[in-house]
């Protein structure tokens, strides 16, 4: 959880600037959680604690950033499988590129 907080703290000033300079006028921050952050299951108390915390952090930060044109959200994939960091980064870049077209008129 502290990594999420440190990375977010470091990224927010850059995202605020990017939102102000962007043609879109917004920047996006997405935290990755899991379904354990939405539904608690037996035997996963500590894992659920961390995942619920990610979602609560994102929801609270979303409210804090309302006037700063930084949209904050969290994504909870149904099943997380171990992958290499480069594979995860490639998937994240593809998802961000797809989301940039969301809501645009073509």
Image (cartoon, rainbow, N blue to C red):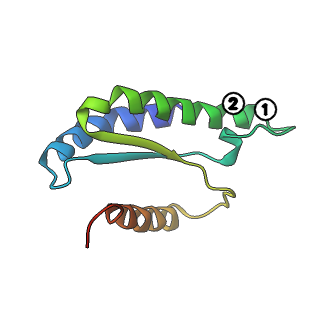
* Mark drawn on residue 49: 2
Q: Please say if the residues under marks 2 and 1 sit with CB atoms less than 8 Å apart.
A: yes
In this rendering, position of residue 24 left or right of residue 95: left
Q: Quadrant of the N terminus?
A: top right
Along the line of sight, the residue nearer the viewer: 31 or 26:
26
Check the image and name the residue furthest to the bottom. Answer: 106
Q: Which mark is residue 23?
A: none
Q: Secondary structure at mark 2?
A: helix
Q: Secondary structure at mark 1?
A: helix
Out of 48 and 65, give the one closest to the viewer. 65
> Dot 1, how many residues are within 10 Å of its Cα: few (below 14), some (14-19), or many (20+)?
few
Q: Position of residue 27 (x, y in %)?
A: 28, 47
Estimate how packed mark 2 is, as few (under 14), some (14 to 19) or many (20 or more) residues with alpha carbons within 10 Å.
few
Q: Which mark, residue 45?
A: 1
Residue 68 position, x and y percent, is: 24, 33
Q: Residue at x 55, y 30 (%)?
A: 56
**Left or right, 51 with reference to 43:** left
Task: Name which quarter of the figure residue 66 lies in.
Answer: top left
> Is 61 positioned to the left or the right of 76 in the image?
left
Q: Residue at x 48, y 66 (%)?
A: 91
Q: Residue at x 48, y 36 (%)?
A: 3
């Amino acid at each position: 959880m502290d990594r999420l907080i440190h990375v977010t703290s470091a990224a927010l000033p850059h995202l605020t600037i990017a939102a102000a300079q962007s043609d879109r006028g917004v920047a996006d921050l997405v935290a990755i959680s899991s379904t354990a952050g939405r539904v608690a299951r037996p035997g996963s108390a500590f894992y659920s604690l961390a995942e619920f915390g990610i979602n609560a952090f994102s929801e609270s930060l979303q409210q804090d950033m309302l006037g700063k044109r930084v949209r904050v959200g969290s994504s909870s994939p149904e099943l997380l499988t171990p992958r290499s960091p480069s594979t995860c980064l490639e998937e994240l870049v593809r998802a961000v590129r797809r989301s940039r077209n969301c809501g645009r008129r073509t």
